[in-house]
Image (cartoon, grey):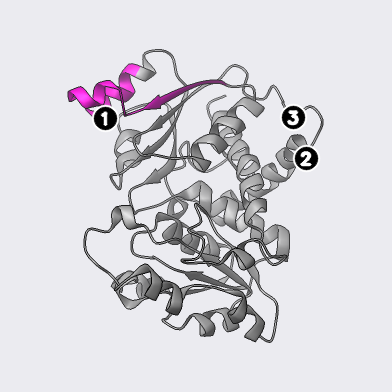
Amino acid sequence: MSQLSSKHLLGIKDLTSDDIQLIFETADNFKDVINRPIKKVPSLRDITIANVFFENSTRTKLSFELAEKRLSADVINFSSSGSSVKKGETLLDTVNNILAMKVDMIVMRHSSPGAPHFLSKHIDANIVNAGDGTHEHPTQALLDTFSMREKLGDLTGKKIAIIGDIIHSRVALSNVFALQKLGAEVMICGPATLVPKYITSLGVKVVTDVFEALQWCDVANILRIQLERQHIKYFPSLREYSLYFGVNKQLLDRLDKEIVIMHPGPINRGVEITSDVADSQHSIILNQVENGVAVRMAVMYLLAGANR
């Protein structure tokens, strides 16, 4: 297999396990590239990529832009703030105007679930979903599972706990899909109010005791509380959340084994995770950030190859 089964990356749900393995193998090569003194290759020098972000982003936007420049692509950045979207322009009109400038690929983040899927039915350019509402965030799941594979080897039979605000997290859903395609077992942990009722239908375990989840798992992927998406009170206070669901050194010291700690960022230190855990030797949080560039290089390289 030398190319992906789809011309877009809309979600992990649409990928095959072979697709994921191909992305990982390609990312392995690009990780070697970004650790060289000269960190650039001419792979996409004839490709123009537009980063179209309708939501705020730091890590994801910077990671995509750096990945694009490492591949020698021409890059344009669009932000909805200060754009014609504020004047009432539709999503499709906005993107079609960008494509009229001869853009080959769109990397898009949008607050509405399904926005990239809608676009894929109306435009010819490759689309990479950089997060659509509370639905999916496929490249984050790919870099997370790539980082786990790098640390643990084959993920078949490995136990992964996803802890935190599950109901508002696009990262959680994409991780569940990716981990299951790679043969891992998944446990969800968080307050009952922050765990969607449908989640058990995906074949995952659900617990509300953080220590139980940590004792069970090989890897704990800890998610932040997404206050910006919460319009009602899901728990009494951040202090109480931290007390009952935060991961701290005292909890890790009680375990009878060592586990790997992950976090997709941004971190709310002292809420879902304490600094002595985030900065500990068990943490691979910064490895996730580094691997994000290599994985996104792989995704865009493979998608661009589908059109050649």
Residue 45 quadrant: top right
Q: Indicate the amino acid at tag 1.
A: Leu
Earlier in the chain: of badge 2 and badge 3, it is 2
Residue 99 in the figure: left or right of residue 216: left
Cβ atoms at labels 2 and 1 below 8 Å apart: no
Q: Which residue is mark 2?
A: 32
Q: How many marks?
A: 3
Residue 207 quadrant: bottom left
Question: Looking at the picture, how far across and down is residue 87, in whole percent?
Answer: 19, 22
Tell me which residue sits at (72%, 45%) in the image: 28
Q: Indicate the amino acid at tag 2.
A: Asp
Cβ atoms at labels 1 and 3 below 8 Å apart: no
Q: Residues within 10 Å of mark 3 (few under 14, many from 20)?
A: some
Residue positioned most to the right? 37
Residue 232 in the figure: left or right of residue 305: left
Q: CA distance from mark 1 to mark 3?
A: 35 Å
Q: Which residue is more in the foreground, 53 or 248?
A: 248
Q: Is residue 159 visible?
A: yes
Question: Looking at the picture, how far across and down is residue 90, in whole percent?
Answer: 22, 27
262 shown above or below 117: below
Question: Looking at the picture, how far across and down is residue 9, in whole percent?
Answer: 47, 42
What range of the chain is rendered magenta? 74-97
SS at mark 3? Answer: loop
Q: Which residue is more in the foreground, 213 or 243?
A: 243
Q: CA distance from mark 2 to mark 1?
A: 37 Å
Q: Which residue is mark 3?
A: 39
Q: CA distance from mark 2 to mark 3?
A: 9 Å
Q: Indicate the amino acid at tag 3.
A: Lys
11 shown above or below 85: below
Q: Residue 36 in magenta?
A: no
